[in-house]
Amino acid sequence: MCLSIPSKVVKIDKESNIATVDTMGVQREAGLDLMEEGDVKIGDYVLLHIGFVMNKIDEEDALASLETYKEILEIMDEEDRQRAILEDDECPNRGN
Amino acid sequence: MGLKLKNLYDDFRKPDTIKAYAKLINDEAKKLKKTINIMEVCGGHTHTIMKFGLPQLMPSNVKFIHGPGCPVCIMPKERIDHAYTLAMQEDVILVTLGDMIKVPGSKGSLQDARAKGADVRYVYSPMECIKIASQNQDKKIIFFAIGFETTTPMTAALVNTVVNKDIKNIFFHINHVTVPEVMVELIDSRDEHVDSYNNQIDAFLGPSHVSVISGSKIYDKFPKDYNRPVVVTGFEPVDMMEGIYMILKQINSNRCENEIQYNRVVSYEGNITAQNLINKYFEKVSLFKWRGLGNVPDSGLKLKDEYSKYDAQVIYKDILPIDEVEDHKLCICGDILRGMAHPNECTIFGTACKPSSPMGSCMVSSEGACAAYYKYGNLI
């Protein structure tokens, strides 16, 4: 019930207050009744719920999260690399 | 790099990132002094947990307690009987959302009513009622509204349109419920039985889209008055892993706060336009009966008295049944909704009760905990 689909706004009909959004290639209409007038613009990412735009997705915050995840992965890769070197150094059969 | 729609799907489900968080969670869990039970309030979270096999990634001292956040599951049979009775009126078209039509009441489900000739329709959006109303002007369209804070503003938007356009043949049976009140109930009912239950709730993963509407402000009291950390978390598996990590970090650093992981859409204040629309048309009811939980104070909404001419519960009060209805003796949906039992502890789970022939609401709704265990249960 509470699930929602990230979508991108491709068209806005001001008269009917309805946006056309693209959800991974599928276009559908969504009411803008729950959004402040003029708040949603073409190109915005939005969350869609039972026929309405329920909020905008903040692009900067989304990118910041993805950047954090990238950094965590890089740190872990580095740790794995260090561990592999260490294990190699300590390997009793080294050089045999 | 700019954000692409694909990033919003794929990057929050990336296996490498999930594994990285699993490692961080396991490292953090080593510092815990006791087992931590985390309640994911929302049924959407329960599904992510099961679909992506998150329990297997957790250390043995971090456990999930599934919460009651499935609006179809918590609907007591009395209210389904209301819907059934309304649907059976000759001049009524009963409209509702999704799985609601499959849940059995004491007289049967809305699907059964339809088999007996009732006009029952389920729609993707409440706004479809407007088209149905204009095509059936000799009929009364009753929208049987269900859902948490996420879905309430969409019903309010329909009420707003009906009032503004003076549409005379759309009415409402309101069954909207609110999350913080039931969280309080869940804490209180456990704290009273502190000796007999060993699954106290230590922290909450706050619902994703309830919080988009209401803002994270609605959870302030949990760290403050109940000493439970809350982290409002998104629905994707990476979101959830990060949310769990944030809870463990709070506990290990002796913090107890109301935080947001899902900050790309949730703010502290929430969607004020949506909140204003809700407040314009709805008010709290003093008691709302939840399946399995009983009467929970201030947890339900109704149309304000000034809009009572649209309220099916007022218009049809003489024919709506008021009898209390018991649940099936073998069904433990009540305990599951209170987080006291897991679906696989039910004797009829997967045998007498399946998605194709459900006995309890948690199996009927595709969002229910039983449906999640049935669909993805081979993972555990």
Image: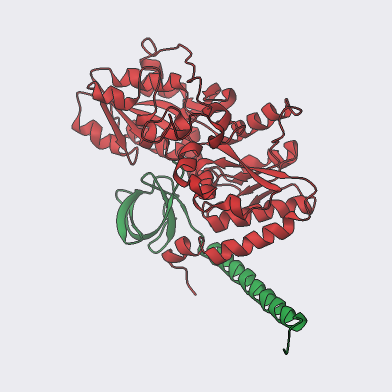
Figure colour of chain B: red
Within the image, what quadrant is residue B110 found in?
top left
B17 sits to left or right of B193: left
Q: Would you say residue B261 is visible in this rendering?
A: no
At x 28%, y 18%, the residue is B88
Looking at the image, which is closer to me, B304 or B268?
B268
Residue B216 position within the rendered picture, expressed as x and y whole percent measured from the top left: 61, 46
Residue B374 spot, x, y in % from top left: 46, 41
Q: Look at the image and tell me whether residue A71 can be seen.
A: yes
Of the chain colours in the picture, the one used for chain A is green
Q: Is residue B65 above or below residue B334?
A: below
Number of numbered labels in the structure image = 0
Please tell me which residue is depicted at 36% across the width and 35% down the height of the picture.
Answer: B356
Judge whether B115 appears above or below A33 on screen. above
At horizontal 44% and vertical 41% (from top left) the residue drawn is A1
Q: Is residue B187 left or right of residue B312?
A: right
Identify the residue at the far front of this view. Answer: A96
Vertical side of B354 occupied by B49: above or below? below
Residue A57: horizontal and vertical position, in percent?
49, 58
Q: Position of residue A76 (x, y in %)?
A: 66, 71
Give the camera-side residue of B332 and B255: B332
Question: For residue B169, what is the image quadrant?
Answer: top left
How did the renderer colour the structure? Answer: by chain
